[in-house]
Image: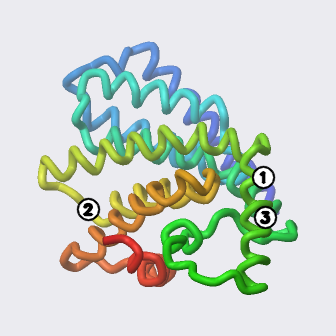
Amino acid sequence: MALQDANRDWQTNIERARQLMSVSDQTNLMDDRNALERQISVVETLQNLAFHDADAGGISDMADWCLRSWLRILSHHPQEVRVLSAIGRWWLARAQPLLARIAVHDNTSSSGSSHSPTRTLASRARTTASSEERQADRAAHEAEARMHLPDYVEARGVLLPATEYLRQAVAAATEQRILTGDLLLAAAEAYMSLGNVSYARVGEGIFEHAVLYLRAASNISGFTLPRHLRRWLDDYGRFVS
């Protein structure tokens, strides 16, 4: 009974959300230059609902409505950090089903995961050709071959706008002196994800962006990096000046 009630409540929330979308469209809410706070509140709420289970792909019609709405708001407020960030996070959420499938594929492949930042950022430190290194090279070649697979190609196409909008958000927040650790973490996550599905020849520059964002976040007074990102930064940050 509890599960049935939960499902019924969920469907009710979805119906109410779609009604809100319809009312917003009918009243041209997203074109009102003087309703920024209301606009952001509405679209953020619906975006959180649309991507409640991002790995499963979310609710397509609601997610698409959110992106269209953000872009309309952005046309009136091109330097609004919250809007730039929300669009970047939208693309990052849209990438999650692809990244989840890629993770499963990588975990079942003979060569393990996609490109490691160690192999890209620290490639200049290699000196010998031991059997372990030859095995690592073989794994790297297999990982490189996977970059041609459809999920990897599509993931790159989705993550590129995620990194671009989050980069713009960081730049605008820096200029406006409102930069936060959470925004830097979102930008770093987007670049880390893009680096993991990119060819090795471009991966180094992508991972360097992630390192720089994490380093900047760690330098914000009172902000603490999550443990796994602190470990990632300690492992790979030493290769980036």
Tell me the kind of residue under disc 2: Thr
**Disc 3 residue crowd, few under 14, some 14–19, many 20+, Cα 10 Å:** some
Asked whether residue 44 appears in the rendered view, the answer is no
Residue 106, label in figure: 3
Residue farthest to the front?
128
In this rendering, the answer to whether 226 lies above or below 156 is: below
Asked which quadrant contains residue 168, the reply is: top left
Viewer-closest of 184 and 50: 184
Between the C-alphas of marks 1 and 3, the distance is: 12 Å
Tell me the kind of residue under disc 3: Asp
On the rendered structure, is 182 left or right of 4?
Answer: left
Residue matched to label 2:
180
Q: Position of residue 223 (x, y in %)?
A: 28, 76
Residue at the (34%, 47%) spot, across then down: 167
Viewer-closest of 33 and 218: 218
Q: Are marks 2 and 1 in contact (CB under 8 Å)?
A: no
Q: Position of residue 115 (x, y in %)?
A: 64, 64
**Mark closer to the chain start, 2 or 1:** 1
**Mark closer to the chain start, 1 or 3:** 3
**Mark closer to the chain start, 3 or 2:** 3
Viewer-closest of 194 and 98: 194
Q: Position of residue 31 (x, y in %)?
A: 32, 17
Residue 145, label in figure: 1
**Disc 2 residue crowd, few under 14, some 14–19, many 20+, Cα 10 Å:** some
Between the C-alphas of marks 2 and 1, the distance is: 38 Å
